């Protein structure tokens, strides 16, 4: 900068103004004022006060900004979201209704009598088994029969358990076995044969986590067995 004349410094300052380099403008203006002050002159506050020149400088600066290539903003790497623990599957509650004080008899041969016979067995009855025995009833009708017919009309309670296919096979519920396959009767198999059958099913896609609702009849207090059916009747 020392090798440049004051005129050259002013030229560079004008160029810096045109390009908008404020830091360079301040440096050059300071050097120019120092030289003027050394000669006893009056320092300048602006390199030009000519409106036409100022307008030209502003126009040049705007053109330079417009012509400058736009640099696309680089995407900022976002931290990977923390893995959320999977919510445990909500276990269904099934149908659980307390019995009334007394139970009333069903007419033999009716759907109500069939419900009592199936639900009062030691292994209860799955929805698949009830569906098969109570055709053409649909699931919603069967559930209504469990809550309304068995409880409100006949006084029995209902209890629900959840069992997998192997447990339903042990209960001889072939309709509700799901992915478990066992065509023989459990009583015809030894414990070793049952274990071998279970191992074979597991190797062929049986899912023991697949469970089914199993419904059981709950008797009123003091009752040892369901009330015997009376007479005969048409299916309800």
Image (tube, rainbow, N blue to C red):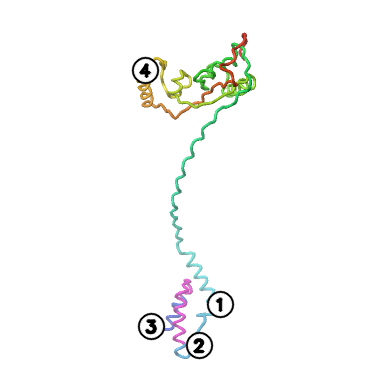
User: Please, is residue 223 above or below residue 42 in the view?
Assistant: above
Side of 21 where 98 appears, left or right: right
Label placed on residue 190? 4
Q: CA distance from mark 3 to mark 2?
A: 20 Å
Label placed on residue 2? 3
**CA neighbours of label 3 inside 10 A, class few (<14), some (14 to 19), many (20+):** few
Q: Which residue is mark 1?
A: 51
Between circles 1 and 4, the one closer to the viewer is 4
Label placed on residue 42? 2
Between circles 2 and 4, the one closer to the viewer is 4
Which sits earlier in the primary sequence, circle 2 or circle 4? 2
Q: Is residue 115 visible?
A: no
Identify the image quadrant of the C terminus. top right
Residue 43 horizontal/vertical position (percent): 50, 85
| SS label for mark 2 | loop
Nearer to us in this view, 229 or 65: 229
Between circles 3 and 4, the one closer to the viewer is 4
Nearer to us in this view, 86 or 7: 86
């Amino acid at each position: 900068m020392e090798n440049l004349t004051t005129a050259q410094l002013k030229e560079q300052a004008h160029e810096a103004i045109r390009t908008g380099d404020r830091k360079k403008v301040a440096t050059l203006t300071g050097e120019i004022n120092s030289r003027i002050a050394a000669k006893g002159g009056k320092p300048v506050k602006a390199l030009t006060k000519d409106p036409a020149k100022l307008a030209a400088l502003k126009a040049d600066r705007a053109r330079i900004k417009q012509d400058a290539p736009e640099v696309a903003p680089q995407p900022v790497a976002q931290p990977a979201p923390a893995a959320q623990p999977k919510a445990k599957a909500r276990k269904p509650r099934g149908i659980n209704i307390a019995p009334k004080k007394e139970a009333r008899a069903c007419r033999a041969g009716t759907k109500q009598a069939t419900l009592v016979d199936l639900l009062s067995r030691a292994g209860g009855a799955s929805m698949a088994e009830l569906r098969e025995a109570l055709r053409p009833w649909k699931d919603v009708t069967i559930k209504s029969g469990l809550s309304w017919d068995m409880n409100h009309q006949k006084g029995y309670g209902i209890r629900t358990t959840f069992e997998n296919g192997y447990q339903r096979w042990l209960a001889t519920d072939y309709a509700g076995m799901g992915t478990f396959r066992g065509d023989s009767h459990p009583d015809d198999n030894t414990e070793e044969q049952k274990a071998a059958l279970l191992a074979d099913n597991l190797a062929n896609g049986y899912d023991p986590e697949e469970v089914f609702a199993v419904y059981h009849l709950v008797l009123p207090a003091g009752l040892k067995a369901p009330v015997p059916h009376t007479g005969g009747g048409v299916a309800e």
